[in-house]
Amino acid sequence: MIYAPSDDTFLLAECAGRYRGRRALELGVGSGLILNVLEKNFEFVAGSDIDLGALVFCKNRTRADLICCDAASAITPVHYFDLVVSNPPYLPDDKEIDSAVHGGPTGVEKTIHFIESAIPMLSKGGKMLLVVSSLADLAALDRFLANAKIQKKVLAEKKLFYETIAVAELRA
Ligand SMILES: C[S@@+](CC[C@H](N)C(=O)[O-])C[C@H]1O[C@@H](n2cnc3c(N)ncnc32)[C@H](O)[C@@H]1O
């Protein structure tokens, strides 16, 4: 099922709207709301999703180039994008029952996969914006970032009654 825009989508949209540049990429486009934000400030926008239904839904609602693939796996890593954004699936679950929301046993496995896929795509000085949640193992994510020498800055945070979500800016 296509992920319906929610608090995490809107927090990412608010942060993504502050950035400008030539090329932007979204990993996991869902309904395409974030693509519409990126289109306003970037000359070229691309987005991927493993859910073909999501891309069909987005097709006539965006000028972005849409790619059905795992993270950025179909894109040659040529340091191309000024900004990569993602609201990855982050709910912890041993089984991937819903690929739109389940992010692996600790909730950060897919997030880390998306980061590893995105970093080689970033232009010099390029940044990645990422939604993270207190429901996932953020200490494990921070260990990964430290090992990979990726800097993290929290741009915005929202406390909900069951979790705290945040948007982090990553720089390699
Ligand atoms: C939490 S939803 C976010 C959707 C949208 N960006 C938003 O913020 O509302 C995560 C999205 O990632 C997609 N997704 C899950 N695994 C993926 C993968 N390996 N590669 C690309 N997209 C994936 C899902 O299909 C879903 O559309």
Image (cartoon, helix red, strand yellow):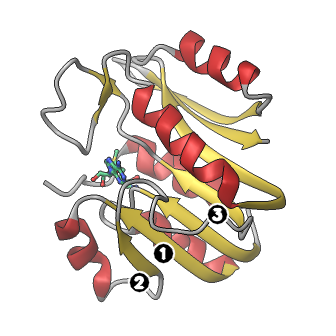
Q: Amino acid at mark 2?
A: Thr
Give the mark nearest the N terminus, 1 or 3: 1
Residue 45 versus residue 76 in the image, above or below: below
Residue 149 in the image: x percent, y percent? 80, 28
Q: Secondary structure at mark 1?
A: helix
**Left or right of 28, for residue 4:** left
**Left or right of 9, for residue 44:** right
Residue 36 numbered mark, or none: 1
Residue 54 numbered mark, or none: none
Q: Amino acid at mark 3?
A: Pro
Q: Nearer the viewer, residue 155 or 63?
A: 63
Q: Secondary structure at mark 2?
A: loop
Residue 71 in the image: x percent, y percent? 44, 54
How far is the residue under mark 1 from the one under mark 3? 24 Å
Q: Residues within 10 Å of mark 3 (few under 14, many from 20)?
A: some
How far is the residue under mark 2 from the one under mark 3? 24 Å
Q: Amino acid at mark 1?
A: Asn
